[in-house]
Image (cartoon, grey):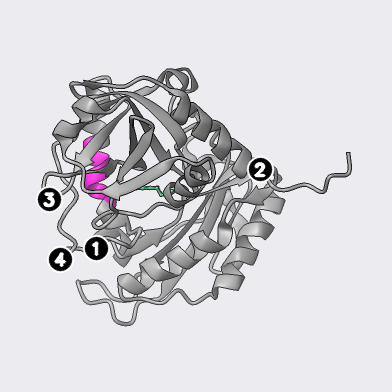
Amino acid sequence: MASVPFDQLEGEIWYNDEFVPWKDAKLHVLSHGLHYASSVFEGERAYGGVIFKLREHTERLHKSAELLGFEIPYSIEEIDEACNELLKRQGFEDAYVRPIAWRGSEMMGVSAQHNRINLAIAIWQWPSYFKPEERLKGIRLDMATYRRPDPATIPCESKAAGLYMICTLSKHEAESKGYADALMLDWRGQVAEATGANVFFVKDGVIHTPTPDCFLDGITRRTVIELARKRGYEVVERAIMPEEMQGFEECFLTGTAAEVTPVSEIGEYRFSVGEITTNLVNDYAQAVQPVREAAE
Ligand SMILES: Cc1ncc(COP(=O)(O)O)c(C=O)c1O
């Protein structure tokens, strides 16, 4: 657990096209984003000084904002450049990158037609999302109480702050019972995802993962599907009912923060950290490394 609060870290934050001292990157309490969750963000990781799939993340950030009805006043190229420049200024090789856009404080109420759209980018060091000692053995997941909502009720493809309310509730409940995370079902009762990562299962050498029709189709998820197919594994995207977990042999999560994390337990179901999971943990670790010129 970090002992220094996040608003007291060192360095700079890119804030509306300026680099400001970390501790001065503030916003007013009457910000629309805070009251009405008009906020979208990204989570990215840099490896060896290069942000993995930066362009895809920035494109998703723009799309997330569009789905919430606002336009980020910086182009995709400008945001990519700001992320890269900030990474250099922060001096990190391996780091977590968090761009966030939100409606400001010009109007206060549900309507916010004239509010400024703000954008900030922060970069800090965040080695492992789950405890490293638990990660290798496979983490333990609780079954969440809340479900991912019907896409007819929310813009589910947006990485919108408001959609994380259920995730925080579920993660807190799981942690209070000694679990690392929680698996959420969707509104139909099908397996959906963990609170900050997508989920995969293995049975008889075949990989199964839920169709992302009401939750984030993670960039890591898509990367891992590609890596799995490159190895010749069959990957099936389909509706998965929770009872099916009884017959699954392996399970793992994927996400920018979580990377590929083996799972040993979900509620009453048990999994082993098998060959397919281990191979994909390693393939992903390899894939995120920047390609170096073969000089040595
Ligand atoms: C709820 C949720 N699902 C899935 C993911 C995985 O997305 P990605 O692989 O793009 O990081 C994340 C992480 O951002 C997430 O927060």
Q: CA distance from mark 4 to mark 1?
A: 19 Å
**Residue 165 lies in magenta, yes or no?**
yes
From the viewer's perspective, is 43 left or right of 172? right
- The amino acid at mark 2 is Gln
From the viewer's perspective, is 115 left or right of 227? left
**Residue 250 found in image quarter:** top left
- The amino acid at mark 3 is Trp
Q: Please tell me how many numbered marks the rendered image carries.
A: 4
Residue 88: % across, % down? 71, 52
**Residue that numbered label 2 is attached to:** 289
Residue 219, can we see it?
yes
Q: CA distance from mark 3 to mark 4?
A: 11 Å
**Residue that numbered label 1 is attached to:** 36
Task: Give the magenta part as a residue range.
Answer: 164-170
Residue at (44, 52) in percent of width and height: 222
From the viewer's perspective, is 101 left or right of 11? left
